Amino acid sequence: MIKMKLKEGYKNTEVGVIPEDWEVKEFVDVMDGFSSGQTPYRAKPEFYKGDIPWITSGELNYNIITDTKEKITIEGVQDALLKTIPKGTFLFAITGLEAAGTRGSCAITGIEATTNQSCMALYPKKALLTTPYLYHFYVRYGNELAFKYCQGTKQQSYTGGIAKKLPIIVPSTTDEQSAIATALSDADALISSLEKLIAKKRNIKQGAMQKLLQPKEGWEVKPFKDLCWFQEGPGIRNWQFTTRGIKVINVTNLVDGILNLDRTDRHISLEEFHKIYEHFEIDQNDIVVASSGNSYGKVSVVRKQDLPLLMNTSVIRFKPMKELDYNFLLIYLKSNQFKNQIDLLITGGAQPNFGPVHLNKISINLPPTKEEQIRIATILMDMENEITALATKLAKYKMIKLGMMQNLLTGKIRLV
């Protein structure tokens, strides 16, 4: 076996390579205290009509908590024997589900508050560890720690004893910890500002869409089926799927306006495709819409690089007829005008779904000329393209931040 030579000034530890002057400690070594809260008696609703903030693990979302969903009274505090958590305290979830996103989540309190029993408050020893560094360390490693150390299967949890033995990489000085935390906080601020800008642009676009698609004098209400061809995918069974042949897409592949085929392993053999399913083959520029499940209504456009493709029963493809502009159709399929009509007709509760029988019953408000359709679609598509460009930039910033975390929290890059 070839032994890799360590870079000068670094050492191997149980958590990987770190600078020689850094240490791997257990939480108990660098904390002054640990505490968790309780839930006031739910059978007394008056306990939840106060003004004292009460935090649950579902509110730990890698954030600074400035408000809470529920607030309790002083009587509720006394009933549960709760203590007030100071502003600036680090909290992490000691119970939760990976699927729900609560396992491994954390936050810092931006207010004085109380908590329930699913939140654990940690109080670092000021001479050894800063709270901002602890926060950024746990943002990076919290889910991995929870996966490795939590007990249970469906509802995973820490005990107090386990939480105290969690490992943490500790830079030798609090000055270096502060420098790391500041750099990562600056990255967070940039990401947060871009997320807010994207949300603002989406709201503006939604308002513009509602206004521009609102029927005006001279517009006609026409049956959707007379202006657009659509086709629902076939009901392909699990036993028909192969690992080679033509890829088959379903609702999970419709992501952010395009198809994500990275994890697609469902195929139909070429023999079966040519024998039964050729007329369900998707074409370039087809508009595909999820028609089933919680993702119903998601819209994506098929690109040349996606082909060849076949759709399954949870996806419907659309092509405009001569009288309907392509981009106007694309905008319409993303609009509330389309979705609201489908919602009134949709079948199924827990698993909503729609199909051609529903599409045959809806209508579309259409400008009198195709030129006007194009003008409206151009305005809205320009807004959508701007949002897409910002979302691409956001994804890039998030990747950069991940790299920063990996380098700064392991000492590969030193800031002091």
Image (cartoon, rainbow, N blue to C red):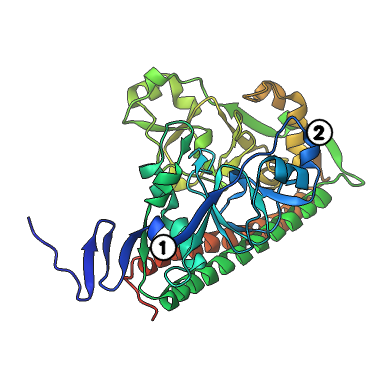
Is the residue marked by circle 2 packed among few (<14), some (14-19), or many (20+) residues within 10 Å?
A: few
Can residue 73 be seen at all in this image of the molecule? no
In this picture, residue 386 sits left or right of residue 100: right
Q: In the current view of this chain or complex, which residue is farthest to the right? A: 217
Q: Which mark is residue 277?
A: none
Q: Which mark is residue 30?
A: 1
In percent of width and height, residue 282 lies at 50, 35
Residue placed at 58% from the left, 50% from the top?
60
Name the residue nearer the viewer: 79 or 302. Answer: 79
Name the residue nearer the viewer: 68 or 298. Answer: 68
In percent of width and height, residue 96 lies at 52, 39
Q: Which mark is residue 222?
A: 2
Residue placed at 63% from the left, 66% from the top?
193
Q: Amino acid at mark 1?
A: Val
Above or below residue 80? Residue 195 is below
In percent of width and height, residue 21 lies at 28, 73
Can residue 86 be seen at all in this image of the molecule? yes
Residue placed at 53% from the left, 64% from the top?
393
In this picture, residue 320 sits left or right of residue 367: left
